[in-house]
Image (cartoon, grey):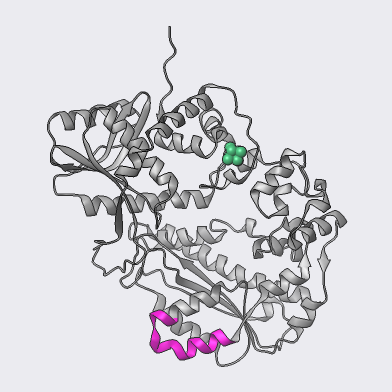
Amino acid sequence: MASRKPYLSKSKLISAWQCPKKLHLEKHHPEVGEITDQMESLFATGHQVGAVAQQLYGTPDSVEIPFNRKMSLMVRETETLIDQGADIPIFEATFQHDGVLIRVDVLIPDGDGWRAIEVKASTSVKDYHVLDCAIQDWVMRHVGLSITSISLAHINNRFVYGGEGDYDGLLVEHDLTDEVRTLEPRVIELIAKARDAVTGPMPDINVGAQCSKPYECQFQSHCWPNETEYPIRGLGGSKARLGNYVALGARDIRDVDVNSITAATQQRIHRVTCEGEPEVLDGGRQTLESLPYPRYYLDFETIGPAVPIWPGTRPYATIPVQWSCHIDDGAGDGSVDSLRHEEFLDLSGKAPMRALAEKMIACLGESGPVLMYTNYEEGVIKGLIDRFPDLAVPLQKIIHRLFDLHPVVKTNYYHPKMLGSWSIKAVLPCIAPHMNYAELEGISEGMGASDGFIEAINPETDWVRKAELEEQLLRYCKFDTEAMVEIVRFFSR
Ligand code: SF4
């Protein structure tokens, strides 16, 4: 008896296109994958954009095919609707041909046929989006549906939200019909490749550039060598080049032939790792000692939702929602406990940017360096100037006082345990082992803070959870400025 063809969803086909090994692992060993907060957040964004698409394309009688673990039921429900002559928009219409299953974001009646729209949370059309649409078009045409056009709708990053839930203009459509129809041979080829990956042995594929493109693969901690003290990924640089080292047998940074490294940063990482001792240059102490008092340590938390929350904001705009500031007037010993602390966080759900800016201006006074880590804070303050031109003068004065700690640390410090990263989270455990972001409860990294804020202002979040999130958000942002204080103390010893 011939064996049944395994079902392949569109997302599985895209996995096979990125890396056949990824699809094999998704099918046979999903437990070795690691879904990060960032991946979860991308899924959530996709759902939010999908909900807006339904609002924009929907009519009072439009229908959504509800998700069911049994795909065959969703396929049957879709068939029944169409066979009965439905003349309404259908969301998540589900079709199957030759074992390939698709769910179409939006189907709109168009004369004797249907107009199909695939909705994406990106701000442009990518090549894999065209392939995605080609898979859908191939299935729909083979089940006998007349597809008059197939388009991709993505976020219009020029859209400015006017409020009142009116998102008309948030999505912009691109008709891909002609392009998609030329891709049929590639779709057929991809289906065969995906079937081999699912039914055959684990594809023998080396790690490389495909591990992060177009999506961060969830199997990186499985596929990349991790069992050594300084895994090779910590050398940094291009993933393609790192993959070549792995193919040649390298597992640890120290396995790499120094003569093959051309970039100065990678040469330094390699040298310090081989020496096994942190590199601390005196330039850090000299630079930081010269900073006058009072010193302000400032950190923002921001959000950048695809679907804007407050009137006057754009999709994915960086919006500050919280800050923490430690103030050292020079009278104490410079330890965190001897410093004054101020903070801002408003979880009322109202736009917090104006009050955030005014309270920050008041907190930072008229003089003294404002220390930050990377120049992110500068971009955030410039965004506040664009939003509130009447505050331009005091905000511009703050910009002139900003002092970026990151280049000082990068030039003057490297510890092998930093594994190629000068992020504050990588530096802190090396210079202040008593402080570790991993030990923070709940919110423990930037993306988590943004999701935590959005959850906290959601009217459906109950007060117990909101109070818990508030405590975690305040603790997290304060930890960032405490970390900067520790960095300055480290160099001042
Ligand atoms: S980590 Fe890289 S090699 Fe491994 S499955 Fe993912 S893309 Fe393929």
Does 209 appear above or below 302?
above
Q: Residue at x 39, y 79 (%)?
A: 387
Q: In the rendering, at what x and y percent does residue 138 appear?
A: 33, 33
Q: Looking at the image, in which quadrant does ligand 1 appear?
A: top right
Q: Residue at x 34, y 27 (%)?
A: 70
Q: Residue furthest top?
A: 1
- Answer with left or right where residue 258 lies relative to residue 237: right
**Viewer can see residue 28:** yes
From the top left corner, tell me how far across and down residue 342 is, in percent.
55, 79
The quadrant holding residue 34 is: top right
Helix, strand or loop for the magenta stretch, by majority: helix
Q: Is residue 166 left or right of residue 43?
A: left
Q: Residue 320, relative to residue 190: is it above or below?
A: below
Looking at the rendering, the stretch of residues picked out in magenta corresponds to 385-400
394 part of magenta stretch: yes
9 lies left or right of 29: left
Residue 303, picture quadrant:
bottom left
Quadrant holding the C terminus: bottom right
The image position of residue 308, as x and y in percent, is 35, 64
Q: Quadrant of the N terminus?
A: top left
Q: Is residue 68 magenta?
A: no
Tell me which corner region of the image, top left, top right, bottom left or bottom right, holds residue 211: top right
For the residue pair 399 and 450, the one nearer the viewer reads as: 399
Judged from this view, the residue extending furthest toward the right is 275
Residue 306 at x, y percent in the picture: 38, 59
Asked if residue 226 can be seen in this view, the reply is no
Residue found at x 56% / y 59%: 445
**Residue 153, placed above or below residue 63:** below
